[in-house]
Amino acid sequence: MDFTTTYVLLPTAKIIAVFIVVLLTVLFLTYAERKVIAFMQVRLGPMRVGPWGLLQPIADGIKLFLKEDIIPLKADRFVYWIAPTISIVPALLSFLVVPWGSETTLFGLAKQPVPAVISDLNIGLLYILAISSIGIYGILLGGWASNSKYPLLGGLRSAAQMVSYEVPLTLALVGPVMMANTLSTRGIVEAQKGMWFVVPQILAFLVYIACAVAETNRAPYDLPEAETELVAGFHTEYSGMKFAFFYLAEYANMIVVSSIATICFLGGWLPVPGLSFLHLPSFVWFALKVGVFLFGYLWIRATYPRYRYDQLMAIGWKFFIPVTLINIFITAFFLLK
Amino acid sequence: MSHAQYIPLLIFLVIAILFPLVTLAIARFFRPSKFSKSKLSPYECGIEEITEARENFNVRYYIVAVVFLIFDVETIFLYPWAVKYRVLGLFGFVEMGIFLLILIFGYVYAWKKGALEWE
Protein backbone atom coordinates (compact mmCIF):
# COMPACT_ATOMS: atom_id res chain seq x y z
CA MET A 1 0.00 0.00 0.00
CA ASP A 2 1.29 3.45 -0.80
CA PHE A 3 1.67 6.36 1.58
CA THR A 4 -1.59 8.19 0.80
CA THR A 5 -3.71 5.07 1.22
CA THR A 6 -2.09 4.08 4.51
CA TYR A 7 -2.01 7.46 6.19
CA VAL A 8 -4.81 9.48 4.58
CA LEU A 9 -7.52 7.51 2.78
CA LEU A 10 -7.93 4.51 5.11
CA PRO A 11 -7.77 6.60 8.33
CA THR A 12 -10.38 8.96 6.88
CA ALA A 13 -12.70 6.02 6.21
CA LYS A 14 -12.09 4.75 9.75
CA ILE A 15 -12.70 8.22 11.23
CA ILE A 16 -16.05 8.52 9.50
CA ALA A 17 -17.04 5.01 10.62
CA VAL A 18 -15.99 5.66 14.24
CA PHE A 19 -17.70 9.07 14.21
CA ILE A 20 -21.03 7.60 13.11
CA VAL A 21 -20.83 4.67 15.54
CA VAL A 22 -19.98 6.98 18.46
CA LEU A 23 -22.83 9.38 17.71
CA LEU A 24 -25.32 6.51 17.35
CA THR A 25 -24.09 4.95 20.59
CA VAL A 26 -24.47 8.26 22.41
CA LEU A 27 -27.96 8.68 20.97
CA PHE A 28 -29.13 5.28 22.16
CA LEU A 29 -27.19 5.49 25.41
CA THR A 30 -29.49 8.37 26.40
CA TYR A 31 -32.45 6.16 25.51
CA ALA A 32 -30.96 3.19 27.41
CA GLU A 33 -30.33 5.41 30.41
CA ARG A 34 -33.95 6.54 30.64
CA LYS A 35 -35.27 3.05 29.99
CA VAL A 36 -32.93 1.20 32.41
CA ILE A 37 -33.49 3.68 35.25
CA ALA A 38 -37.23 3.60 34.58
CA PHE A 39 -37.34 -0.18 34.86
CA MET A 40 -35.24 -0.08 38.03
CA GLN A 41 -37.80 2.31 39.50
CA VAL A 42 -40.75 0.21 38.25
CA ARG A 43 -41.75 2.74 35.59
CA LEU A 44 -42.03 2.32 31.83
CA GLY A 45 -39.84 5.19 30.67
CA PRO A 46 -40.32 6.74 27.21
CA MET A 47 -43.11 4.89 25.35
CA ARG A 48 -44.75 7.45 23.03
CA VAL A 49 -42.33 8.07 20.16
CA GLY A 50 -41.98 4.96 17.99
CA PRO A 51 -42.28 1.37 19.25
CA TRP A 52 -41.28 1.25 22.96
CA GLY A 53 -40.18 4.87 22.59
CA LEU A 54 -37.22 3.82 20.42
CA LEU A 55 -37.33 7.02 18.36
CA GLN A 56 -37.26 9.21 21.48
CA PRO A 57 -33.53 10.19 21.17
CA ILE A 58 -34.11 11.27 17.55
CA ALA A 59 -37.11 13.36 18.59
CA ASP A 60 -34.98 14.92 21.36
CA GLY A 61 -32.25 15.72 18.86
CA ILE A 62 -34.65 17.43 16.46
CA LYS A 63 -36.17 19.38 19.34
CA LEU A 64 -32.77 20.64 20.51
CA PHE A 65 -31.87 21.52 16.93
CA LEU A 66 -34.95 23.75 16.59
CA LYS A 67 -34.60 25.43 20.00
CA GLU A 68 -33.72 29.09 20.37
CA ASP A 69 -30.06 29.73 21.11
CA ILE A 70 -30.06 31.92 24.22
CA ILE A 71 -26.95 33.97 24.99
CA PRO A 72 -27.43 35.91 28.26
CA LEU A 73 -26.78 39.65 27.91
CA LYS A 74 -24.05 39.58 30.55
CA ALA A 75 -22.28 36.58 29.08
CA ASP A 76 -18.87 36.73 27.48
CA ARG A 77 -20.15 36.02 23.98
CA PHE A 78 -17.05 34.50 22.37
CA VAL A 79 -16.11 32.24 25.30
CA TYR A 80 -19.76 31.29 25.77
CA TRP A 81 -19.90 30.25 22.15
CA ILE A 82 -16.60 28.36 22.03
CA ALA A 83 -16.95 26.42 25.34
CA PRO A 84 -19.24 23.62 24.01
CA THR A 85 -16.84 23.13 21.09
CA ILE A 86 -13.86 22.81 23.47
CA SER A 87 -15.90 20.26 25.38
CA ILE A 88 -16.92 18.04 22.45
CA VAL A 89 -13.73 18.07 20.33
CA PRO A 90 -11.42 16.28 22.87
CA ALA A 91 -14.19 13.79 23.67
CA LEU A 92 -14.32 12.78 19.99
CA LEU A 93 -10.54 12.95 19.44
CA SER A 94 -9.95 10.39 22.20
CA PHE A 95 -11.33 7.72 19.88
CA LEU A 96 -8.26 8.11 17.65
CA VAL A 97 -6.38 5.40 19.56
CA VAL A 98 -9.27 3.21 20.75
CA PRO A 99 -8.83 -0.23 19.10
CA TRP A 100 -12.31 -1.65 18.56
CA GLY A 101 -11.11 -5.02 17.22
CA SER A 102 -8.04 -6.91 16.07
CA GLU A 103 -8.15 -6.37 12.31
CA THR A 104 -10.71 -5.15 9.81
CA THR A 105 -11.16 -4.80 6.08
CA LEU A 106 -13.68 -1.96 6.53
CA PHE A 107 -16.41 -3.80 4.58
CA GLY A 108 -13.99 -4.64 1.79
CA LEU A 109 -12.67 -1.09 1.43
CA ALA A 110 -9.13 -2.19 2.28
CA LYS A 111 -7.50 -4.87 0.13
CA GLN A 112 -5.85 -6.64 3.07
CA PRO A 113 -6.91 -6.51 6.76
CA VAL A 114 -5.69 -3.41 8.56
CA PRO A 115 -5.51 -2.79 12.34
CA ALA A 116 -8.96 -1.87 13.69
CA VAL A 117 -7.84 1.44 15.16
CA ILE A 118 -7.68 4.85 13.47
CA SER A 119 -4.01 5.37 14.31
CA ASP A 120 -1.93 3.11 16.54
CA LEU A 121 0.21 5.80 18.21
CA ASN A 122 3.09 4.46 20.29
CA ILE A 123 2.06 6.87 23.07
CA GLY A 124 -1.64 5.87 22.81
CA LEU A 125 -2.58 5.83 26.48
CA LEU A 126 -0.67 9.04 27.24
CA TYR A 127 -2.45 10.66 24.29
CA ILE A 128 -5.90 9.77 25.67
CA LEU A 129 -4.99 11.08 29.14
CA ALA A 130 -3.64 14.31 27.65
CA ILE A 131 -6.47 14.98 25.24
CA SER A 132 -9.26 14.15 27.69
CA SER A 133 -7.88 16.67 30.21
CA ILE A 134 -8.61 19.45 27.71
CA GLY A 135 -12.32 18.75 28.12
CA ILE A 136 -12.15 20.32 31.61
CA TYR A 137 -11.56 23.71 29.94
CA GLY A 138 -14.87 23.45 28.11
CA ILE A 139 -16.80 23.00 31.36
CA LEU A 140 -14.84 25.64 33.29
CA LEU A 141 -15.06 28.22 30.50
CA GLY A 142 -18.75 27.48 29.93
CA GLY A 143 -19.47 28.05 33.61
CA TRP A 144 -17.42 31.23 33.74
CA ALA A 145 -18.63 32.77 30.49
CA SER A 146 -22.30 32.50 31.50
CA ASN A 147 -21.67 35.17 34.17
CA SER A 148 -24.38 33.76 36.36
CA LYS A 149 -24.10 32.30 39.86
CA TYR A 150 -25.12 28.67 39.41
CA PRO A 151 -23.00 28.01 36.32
CA LEU A 152 -19.96 29.66 37.93
CA LEU A 153 -20.23 27.52 41.05
CA GLY A 154 -20.90 24.41 38.96
CA GLY A 155 -17.91 25.12 36.72
CA LEU A 156 -15.58 25.66 39.69
CA ARG A 157 -16.73 22.49 41.42
CA SER A 158 -16.43 20.56 38.23
CA ALA A 159 -12.86 21.73 37.57
CA ALA A 160 -11.75 20.98 41.14
CA GLN A 161 -13.37 17.54 41.05
CA MET A 162 -11.99 16.58 37.65
CA VAL A 163 -8.42 17.64 38.40
CA SER A 164 -8.56 15.88 41.79
CA TYR A 165 -9.65 12.58 40.29
CA GLU A 166 -7.29 12.81 37.37
CA VAL A 167 -4.32 12.11 39.67
CA PRO A 168 -5.51 8.72 41.04
CA LEU A 169 -6.89 7.83 37.58
CA THR A 170 -3.49 8.43 35.97
CA LEU A 171 -1.73 6.56 38.79
CA ALA A 172 -4.11 3.60 38.48
CA LEU A 173 -3.19 3.16 34.81
CA VAL A 174 0.55 2.96 35.61
CA GLY A 175 0.10 -0.66 36.78
CA PRO A 176 -1.17 -2.08 33.45
CA VAL A 177 1.52 -0.09 31.60
CA MET A 178 4.24 -1.66 33.79
CA MET A 179 2.93 -5.13 32.95
CA ALA A 180 2.49 -4.46 29.22
CA ASN A 181 5.74 -2.48 28.76
CA THR A 182 4.09 -0.26 26.17
CA LEU A 183 1.75 2.71 25.90
CA SER A 184 0.30 1.60 22.57
CA THR A 185 -3.34 0.61 23.13
CA ARG A 186 -3.02 -2.35 20.76
CA GLY A 187 0.13 -3.44 22.56
CA ILE A 188 -1.59 -3.34 25.94
CA VAL A 189 -4.43 -5.55 24.68
CA GLU A 190 -2.04 -8.02 23.06
CA ALA A 191 -0.06 -8.28 26.31
CA GLN A 192 -3.21 -9.66 27.96
CA LYS A 193 -3.42 -12.79 25.80
CA GLY A 194 -2.23 -14.93 28.76
CA MET A 195 -4.20 -13.25 31.54
CA TRP A 196 -6.39 -10.17 31.75
CA PHE A 197 -4.81 -7.39 33.80
CA VAL A 198 -7.90 -7.20 35.98
CA VAL A 199 -6.58 -10.18 37.97
CA PRO A 200 -3.14 -8.90 39.05
CA GLN A 201 -4.27 -5.24 38.97
CA ILE A 202 -7.54 -5.62 40.87
CA LEU A 203 -6.71 -2.68 43.19
CA ALA A 204 -5.96 -0.39 40.25
CA PHE A 205 -9.11 -1.60 38.49
CA LEU A 206 -11.41 -0.75 41.39
CA VAL A 207 -9.82 2.68 41.86
CA TYR A 208 -10.02 3.28 38.11
CA ILE A 209 -13.77 2.56 38.00
CA ALA A 210 -14.48 4.93 40.89
CA CYS A 211 -12.30 7.68 39.39
CA ALA A 212 -13.76 7.21 35.92
CA VAL A 213 -17.26 7.85 37.25
CA ALA A 214 -15.99 11.01 38.96
CA GLU A 215 -14.06 12.15 35.84
CA THR A 216 -17.22 12.03 33.74
CA ASN A 217 -19.29 13.86 36.39
CA ARG A 218 -21.77 11.04 36.70
CA ALA A 219 -23.83 9.95 39.71
CA PRO A 220 -22.97 9.45 42.57
CA TYR A 221 -20.23 12.04 41.89
CA ASP A 222 -22.43 14.38 39.83
CA LEU A 223 -21.81 17.35 42.16
CA PRO A 224 -21.22 19.80 39.27
CA GLU A 225 -24.81 19.31 38.15
CA ALA A 226 -26.40 18.66 41.53
CA GLU A 227 -29.89 19.82 40.57
CA THR A 228 -31.09 20.18 44.15
CA GLU A 229 -28.54 22.92 44.85
CA LEU A 230 -27.13 24.19 41.54
CA VAL A 231 -30.12 23.93 39.15
CA ALA A 232 -28.07 22.34 36.33
CA GLY A 233 -24.51 23.37 37.18
CA PHE A 234 -22.23 24.72 34.46
CA HIS A 235 -24.79 24.46 31.65
CA THR A 236 -27.70 26.21 33.40
CA GLU A 237 -27.67 29.09 30.89
CA TYR A 238 -27.13 26.95 27.80
CA SER A 239 -29.92 25.99 25.44
CA GLY A 240 -30.45 24.38 22.05
CA MET A 241 -27.51 22.86 20.18
CA LYS A 242 -24.88 24.31 22.52
CA PHE A 243 -26.47 22.43 25.40
CA ALA A 244 -26.64 19.37 23.16
CA PHE A 245 -22.87 19.49 22.62
CA PHE A 246 -22.19 19.49 26.37
CA TYR A 247 -24.56 16.55 26.64
CA LEU A 248 -22.89 14.72 23.74
CA ALA A 249 -19.46 15.31 25.26
CA GLU A 250 -20.52 13.86 28.61
CA TYR A 251 -21.84 10.67 27.03
CA ALA A 252 -18.92 10.37 24.60
CA ASN A 253 -16.57 10.65 27.60
CA MET A 254 -18.46 7.84 29.29
CA ILE A 255 -17.75 5.66 26.26
CA VAL A 256 -14.09 6.74 26.25
CA VAL A 257 -13.44 5.83 29.91
CA SER A 258 -15.33 2.54 29.48
CA SER A 259 -13.14 1.78 26.45
CA ILE A 260 -9.96 2.54 28.44
CA ALA A 261 -11.14 0.21 31.21
CA THR A 262 -11.80 -2.49 28.62
CA ILE A 263 -8.40 -1.98 26.96
CA CYS A 264 -6.29 -1.79 30.11
CA PHE A 265 -8.00 -4.32 32.36
CA LEU A 266 -10.47 -6.53 30.48
CA GLY A 267 -8.44 -7.61 27.48
CA GLY A 268 -9.94 -5.27 24.86
CA TRP A 269 -11.20 -7.27 21.90
CA LEU A 270 -9.94 -10.64 23.21
CA PRO A 271 -12.69 -13.21 23.84
CA VAL A 272 -13.76 -14.01 27.40
CA PRO A 273 -11.62 -17.00 28.60
CA GLY A 274 -13.58 -20.20 28.08
CA LEU A 275 -15.94 -18.64 25.55
CA SER A 276 -13.55 -18.40 22.58
CA PHE A 277 -15.34 -21.36 20.90
CA LEU A 278 -18.18 -18.95 20.04
CA HIS A 279 -15.97 -17.41 17.29
CA LEU A 280 -17.58 -14.01 17.59
CA PRO A 281 -15.90 -11.20 15.62
CA SER A 282 -13.45 -9.22 17.78
CA PHE A 283 -15.45 -5.98 17.63
CA VAL A 284 -18.45 -7.80 19.18
CA TRP A 285 -16.36 -8.75 22.21
CA PHE A 286 -15.14 -5.17 22.52
CA ALA A 287 -18.67 -3.76 22.24
CA LEU A 288 -19.98 -6.27 24.80
CA LYS A 289 -17.33 -5.34 27.37
CA VAL A 290 -17.85 -1.61 26.88
CA GLY A 291 -21.60 -2.22 27.07
CA VAL A 292 -21.21 -3.90 30.47
CA PHE A 293 -19.41 -0.80 31.77
CA LEU A 294 -22.03 1.57 30.37
CA PHE A 295 -24.77 -0.49 31.99
CA GLY A 296 -22.80 -0.30 35.24
CA TYR A 297 -22.89 3.51 34.98
CA LEU A 298 -26.69 3.49 34.74
CA TRP A 299 -27.01 0.91 37.50
CA ILE A 300 -24.84 2.98 39.85
CA ARG A 301 -26.88 6.07 39.05
CA ALA A 302 -30.13 4.30 39.94
CA THR A 303 -28.68 2.83 43.14
CA TYR A 304 -26.51 5.31 45.06
CA PRO A 305 -27.30 8.72 46.57
CA ARG A 306 -25.08 11.69 45.76
CA TYR A 307 -21.85 12.32 47.66
CA ARG A 308 -21.26 15.41 49.77
CA TYR A 309 -18.60 17.69 48.28
CA ASP A 310 -16.10 17.52 51.16
CA GLN A 311 -16.44 13.71 51.27
CA LEU A 312 -15.84 13.59 47.52
CA MET A 313 -12.62 15.58 47.74
CA ALA A 314 -11.46 13.68 50.84
CA ILE A 315 -11.89 10.20 49.35
CA GLY A 316 -10.09 11.26 46.16
CA TRP A 317 -7.04 12.78 47.80
CA LYS A 318 -6.77 10.78 51.01
CA PHE A 319 -7.82 7.29 49.97
CA PHE A 320 -7.48 6.67 46.22
CA ILE A 321 -4.00 8.24 45.85
CA PRO A 322 -2.38 6.15 48.65
CA VAL A 323 -4.07 3.00 47.33
CA THR A 324 -2.77 3.54 43.78
CA LEU A 325 0.75 4.30 45.08
CA ILE A 326 0.70 1.07 47.09
CA ASN A 327 -0.49 -0.76 43.97
CA ILE A 328 2.48 0.61 41.99
CA PHE A 329 4.88 -0.61 44.69
CA ILE A 330 3.28 -4.06 44.79
CA THR A 331 3.40 -4.33 40.98
CA ALA A 332 7.03 -3.16 40.90
CA PHE A 333 7.98 -5.67 43.58
CA PHE A 334 6.42 -8.64 41.80
CA LEU A 335 7.85 -7.71 38.41
CA LEU A 336 11.33 -7.56 39.94
CA LYS A 337 13.39 -10.54 38.80
CA MET B 1 7.88 7.30 9.08
CA SER B 2 6.57 7.37 12.64
CA HIS B 3 5.39 11.00 12.38
CA ALA B 4 3.00 10.01 9.61
CA GLN B 5 0.90 8.33 12.29
CA TYR B 6 -0.20 11.79 13.32
CA ILE B 7 -1.73 12.67 9.95
CA PRO B 8 -5.02 10.90 10.93
CA LEU B 9 -5.02 13.05 14.09
CA LEU B 10 -5.01 16.22 11.96
CA ILE B 11 -7.82 14.89 9.76
CA PHE B 12 -9.84 13.90 12.83
CA LEU B 13 -9.21 17.30 14.44
CA VAL B 14 -10.59 19.11 11.39
CA ILE B 15 -13.68 16.87 11.25
CA ALA B 16 -14.26 17.14 15.02
CA ILE B 17 -14.07 20.96 14.95
CA LEU B 18 -16.23 21.25 11.84
CA PHE B 19 -18.97 19.08 13.36
CA PRO B 20 -20.20 21.55 16.04
CA LEU B 21 -19.51 24.62 13.87
CA VAL B 22 -21.45 23.34 10.87
CA THR B 23 -24.33 22.07 13.02
CA LEU B 24 -24.62 25.42 14.80
CA ALA B 25 -24.45 27.29 11.49
CA ILE B 26 -27.20 25.16 9.91
CA ALA B 27 -29.40 25.39 13.02
CA ARG B 28 -29.26 29.20 12.63
CA PHE B 29 -31.70 29.01 9.73
CA PHE B 30 -34.28 26.96 11.62
CA ARG B 31 -34.29 28.17 15.19
CA PRO B 32 -36.36 31.12 16.41
CA SER B 33 -34.68 34.17 17.88
CA LYS B 34 -36.90 36.53 19.82
CA PHE B 35 -35.25 39.18 21.95
CA SER B 36 -36.60 39.77 25.43
CA LYS B 37 -34.71 41.43 28.25
CA SER B 38 -35.89 39.20 31.07
CA LYS B 39 -35.23 36.07 29.03
CA LEU B 40 -31.62 37.08 28.51
CA SER B 41 -30.97 38.00 32.15
CA PRO B 42 -28.96 35.52 34.28
CA TYR B 43 -31.00 32.64 35.65
CA GLU B 44 -31.85 33.28 39.29
CA CYS B 45 -34.88 31.06 39.87
CA GLY B 46 -37.21 33.86 38.77
CA ILE B 47 -35.94 36.46 41.22
CA GLU B 48 -34.24 39.64 40.06
CA GLU B 49 -30.48 39.59 40.28
CA ILE B 50 -29.09 41.38 43.34
CA THR B 51 -25.33 40.89 43.21
CA GLU B 52 -22.82 40.16 40.48
CA ALA B 53 -21.95 36.52 39.79
CA ARG B 54 -18.20 37.02 39.58
CA GLU B 55 -17.32 37.67 43.18
CA ASN B 56 -14.75 36.17 45.52
CA PHE B 57 -14.84 32.43 45.76
CA ASN B 58 -13.30 29.92 48.13
CA VAL B 59 -9.48 29.90 48.19
CA ARG B 60 -9.65 26.06 48.41
CA TYR B 61 -10.13 25.90 44.65
CA TYR B 62 -6.72 27.54 44.13
CA ILE B 63 -5.03 25.21 46.61
CA VAL B 64 -6.49 22.16 44.88
CA ALA B 65 -5.23 23.49 41.55
CA VAL B 66 -1.70 24.00 42.91
CA VAL B 67 -1.54 20.57 44.57
CA PHE B 68 -2.91 18.99 41.37
CA LEU B 69 -0.24 20.70 39.28
CA ILE B 70 2.58 19.14 41.32
CA PHE B 71 1.01 15.68 41.49
CA ASP B 72 0.02 15.47 37.86
CA VAL B 73 3.50 16.34 36.60
CA GLU B 74 4.98 13.69 38.90
CA THR B 75 2.52 11.02 37.78
CA ILE B 76 3.39 11.68 34.14
CA PHE B 77 7.07 11.09 35.07
CA LEU B 78 6.04 7.58 36.10
CA TYR B 79 4.95 6.63 32.58
CA PRO B 80 8.31 6.40 30.78
CA TRP B 81 9.64 4.53 33.82
CA ALA B 82 6.70 2.10 33.75
CA VAL B 83 7.24 1.35 30.04
CA LYS B 84 10.93 0.48 30.58
CA TYR B 85 10.56 -1.07 34.04
CA ARG B 86 11.45 -4.65 33.05
CA VAL B 87 14.63 -3.38 31.37
CA LEU B 88 15.69 -1.21 34.31
CA GLY B 89 15.23 -3.96 36.91
CA LEU B 90 16.45 -3.36 40.47
CA PHE B 91 18.03 -0.03 39.49
CA GLY B 92 14.63 1.22 38.32
CA PHE B 93 12.96 -0.05 41.48
CA VAL B 94 15.35 1.82 43.79
CA GLU B 95 15.38 4.98 41.67
CA MET B 96 11.60 5.21 41.56
CA GLY B 97 11.42 4.30 45.24
CA ILE B 98 13.50 7.41 46.03
CA PHE B 99 11.40 9.53 43.62
CA LEU B 100 8.14 8.32 45.14
CA LEU B 101 9.46 8.85 48.68
CA ILE B 102 10.07 12.51 47.87
CA LEU B 103 6.57 12.66 46.37
CA ILE B 104 5.05 11.00 49.46
CA PHE B 105 6.98 13.42 51.69
CA GLY B 106 5.33 16.33 49.87
CA TYR B 107 1.99 14.57 50.04
CA VAL B 108 2.23 14.10 53.82
CA TYR B 109 3.31 17.74 54.17
CA ALA B 110 0.30 18.94 52.16
CA TRP B 111 -1.97 16.72 54.24
CA LYS B 112 -0.53 17.99 57.56
CA LYS B 113 -0.80 21.61 56.39
CA GLY B 114 -4.49 21.01 55.72
CA ALA B 115 -4.32 21.53 51.93
CA LEU B 116 -6.50 18.45 51.42
CA GLU B 117 -9.17 19.51 53.91
CA TRP B 118 -12.44 20.91 52.63
CA GLU B 119 -14.74 22.48 55.17
Image (cartoon, coloured by chain):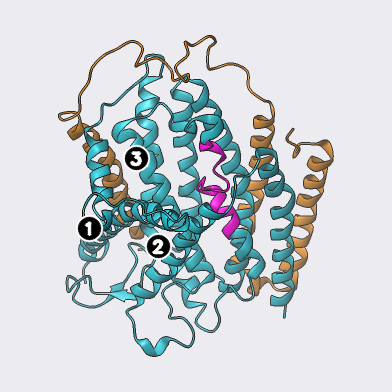
Chain colours: A cyan, B orange
Q: Chain letter of disc 3? A: A
Earlier in the chain: of badge 2 and badge 3, it is: 2
Q: Nearer the viewer, mark 3 or mark 1?
A: 1
Q: Is residue A224 magenta?
A: yes
Q: Secondary structure at mark 2?
A: loop
Boundaries of the magenta span: A209-226
Circle nearer the N terminus (3, 1): 1
Badge 1 amino acid: Pro
| Residue at which label 2 appears | A98
List x then y, in percent, for residue A59.
Answer: 23, 45
Marker disc for residue A121: none
Outermost residue, right direction? B112
Would residue A104 be visible to someone looking at this image? yes
* Real-space CA distance between mark 3 and mark 1, rounded to the nearest whole angstrom: 27 Å
| Marks 2 and 3, how far apart at CA | 21 Å
> Around disc 2, counting alpha carbons within 10 Å, would you say few (fewer than 14), some (14 to 19), or many (20 or more)?
many
* Chain letter belonging to callout 2: A
The residue carrying mark 3 is A245
